[in-house]
Image: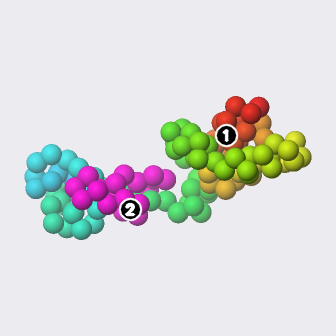
Amino acid sequence: MKVFKKLLVPDCQLCNAVNLQVVYDSPVDGRSWAWQCQACFDEHGSPALASKTVRMTNEEALARDDVKVNRKAEREWAESFNLDDLESIVMGDCDAPTACPNGCEVEPDGQCQHGYKSILLLLGVI
């Protein structure tokens, strides 16, 4: 079985379980394919045809240089950003570093080593 490591792991398409650490992409009872949690895979999956996707730890993600930035997740993170925190960043030192979704320090007009833009860039402040 092929095993993939990703930052974001899909939800189970059979029971709608979320925030999974492991999912399987497999035919359901030999028919159409679906992302499945461990319990659904044990009941309906086809191990001979399946692939396994495991969520990366933050340490693994930070250690990789080839992780692709998920722009949709980046936008959602920026839109949910606490405006009080934004005000303290903007009103504070203009060279103060900000953080990306992974927690990396980012220059206000830059991006982290993994390609995430600063919150100020994402929100159009600068």
Q: Earlier in the sequence, mark 1 or mark 2?
A: 2
Residue 66: x, y in percent?
Answer: 56, 45
Is residue 24 found left or right of 123 in the rendered image?
Answer: left
Residue 121: x, y in percent?
Answer: 71, 35
Residue 9: x, y in percent?
Answer: 40, 54
Q: Residue at x 53, y 63 (%)?
A: 57
Q: Is residue 122 above or below residue 9?
A: above
Q: Amino acid at mark 1?
A: Lys
Q: Is residue 107 above or below residue 25?
A: above
Q: Is residue 123 above or below residue 103?
A: above
Q: Residue furthest right?
A: 93
Q: Amino acid at mark 2?
A: Leu
Residue 39: x, y in percent?
Answer: 24, 68
Q: Which residues are magenta?
A: 1-23
Residue 83 or residue 73, whichever sits in front: 83
Label placed on residue 32: none
**Residue 14: which quarter of the image?**
bottom left
Question: Helix or strand or loop: what does disc 2 sit on?
Answer: loop
Give the residue at mark 2: 20
Question: Helix or strand or loop: what does disc 1 sit on?
Answer: loop
Residue 71 or residue 7, whichever sits in front: 71
Answer few, some or many: residues within 10 Å of disc 2's Cα (few below 14, many 20 plus, some between 14 and 19): some
Q: Residue at x 41, y 60 (%)?
A: 19
